[in-house]
Image (tube, helix red, strand yellow):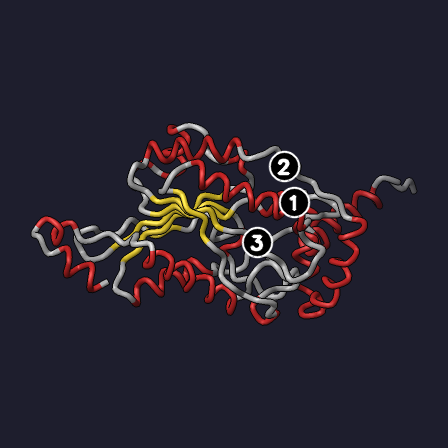
């Protein structure tokens, strides 16, 4: 009887693909990347329409970084605004790097969804990724492996991350080169022209508790660039200070950078307070037309 020598490796490959590959590499589906809230009814009461630009900082992570984690601070921000009687619209534009920002008005309106109109407030959570330290880069399988292993070992990931962070300061390498803020400047020029009444805020990057995950020198350089960009583009572009989370591990996940649900609640309240303090809430159009805008403002 003749045995096909190829059958064994093929069978092993099929079994690996069916049973082990999902366990190791496959990430949970990201349900929140394109999550949005429709534009508010401008005649119904005080409103604000928000566009957020960034990546996974908007999640309430469990013990470790997970793309499939539930939505975090945007949910709490909208809840806090609603408690103040303010109807908010929300849209997320997923951007990792300055170079991925829209560089033309046509691209901006396409990604914004032109039928929404101009937002009242745009805040940008980008920049820290340039300072990230990594061993194996950002390949989708590496990210999947990291998230799956962290999810399966539970709270043991916290002491493991302390070891990882110490080794990152010595052996890790950065996978992303920082070429300056030219693309950020172009985006701001385009967006300020396209939306002449919109206020923009460049969010000050959060510092991790552990020293390893981010290169502090590079993080400081990116933060300085954000301040410089805001100064270059006039009074409609601000630097938004980050909330004070201190060194409280009860608010962070194992990488000491992303927030859990408790931390996300604080960040959400911080954003809601900032929107109110900056006067970004719009009055009802009917009330403004009838001359009762002062009452609306005082009610907010």
Residue 228 vs 37, above or below: the answer is above
Residues marked 2 and 1 touching at CB (< 8 Å): yes
Q: Which residue is mark 1?
A: 218
Which mark sits nearer the N-terminus, 2 or 3? 3
SS state under label 3: loop
Residue highlighted by disc 2: 178
Q: Nearer the viewer, mark 3 or mark 1?
A: 1
Q: Gap in Å between the C-alphas at discs 2 and 3?
A: 24 Å
Give the percent coordinates (x, y) of residue 204: 51, 51
Q: Earlier in the sequence, mark 2 or mark 1?
A: 2
Query: Whole-Å distance between the Cαs marked 2 and 1?
Result: 9 Å
Tell which of 214 and 65 is nearer to you.
214
Among the two numbered marks 3 and 1 on one chain, the one whose residue lies closer to the N terminus: 3
Q: Is residue 182 left or right of residue 189?
A: right
Residue carrying label 3: 67
Secondary element at tag 2: loop
Quarter holding residue 73 = bottom left
Quadrant of the snapshot with the C terminus: bottom left
Left or right: 290 as drawn, with respect to 189: left
Residue at left 49%, top 61%? 243
**In the rendered image, is residue 100 in sight?**
yes
- Image quarter in which the N terminus is found: top right
Question: Residue 187 at what x, y percent from top left?
Answer: 44, 33
**Distance from Cα at disc 3 to Cα at disc 1:** 25 Å
Give how far across and how far down residue 212 sits, in percent: 72, 55
Q: Residue at x 56, y 68 (%)?
A: 251
| Residue furthest right in the image | 1
Task: In this rendered view, identify the residue nearer to me: 1 or 125.
Answer: 125
Q: Are marks 2 and 3 in contact (CB under 8 Å)?
A: no
């Amino acid at each position: 009887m003749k045995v096909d020598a190829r059958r064994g490796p093929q069978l092993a490959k099929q079994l690996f693909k069916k049973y082990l590959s999902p366990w190791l590499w496959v990430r949970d589906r990201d349900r929140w990347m394109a999550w949005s809230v429709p534009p508010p009814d401008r005649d119904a009461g005080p409103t604000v329409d928000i566009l957020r630009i960034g990546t996974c900082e908007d999640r309430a992570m469990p013990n470790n970084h997970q793309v499939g984690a539930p939505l975090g601070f945007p949910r709490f921000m909208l809840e806090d605004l609603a408690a103040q009687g303010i109807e908010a619209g929300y849209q997320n534009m997923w951007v990792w790097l300055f170079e991925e920002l829209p560089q033309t008005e046509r691209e901006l309106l396409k990604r914004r969804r032109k039928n929404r109109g101009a937002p009242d407030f745009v805040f940008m959570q980008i920049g820290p990724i340039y300072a990230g330290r990594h061993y194996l880069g950002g390949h989708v399988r590496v990210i999947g492996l990291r998230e799956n292993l962290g999810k399966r070992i539970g709270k043991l990931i916290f002491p493991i991350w302390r070891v990882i962070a110490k080794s990152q300061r010595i052996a890790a390498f950065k996978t992303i080169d920082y070429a300056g803020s030219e693309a950020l400047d172009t985006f701001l020029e385009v967006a300020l022209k396209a939306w002449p009444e919109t206020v923009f805020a460049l969010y000050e990057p959060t510092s991790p508790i552990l020293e390893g995950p981010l290169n502090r020198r590079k993080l400081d350089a990116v933060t300085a660039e954000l301040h410089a960009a805001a100064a270059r583009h006039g009074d409609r572009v601000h630097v938004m200070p980050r909330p004070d989370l201190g060194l409280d591990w009860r608010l962070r996940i194992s990488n000491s950078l992303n927030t859990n649900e408790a931390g996300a609640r604080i960040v959400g309240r911080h954003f809601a307070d900032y929107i109110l303090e900056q006067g970004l809430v719009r009055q009802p159009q009917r009330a403004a037309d009838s001359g009762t805008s002062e009452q609306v403002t005082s009610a907010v």
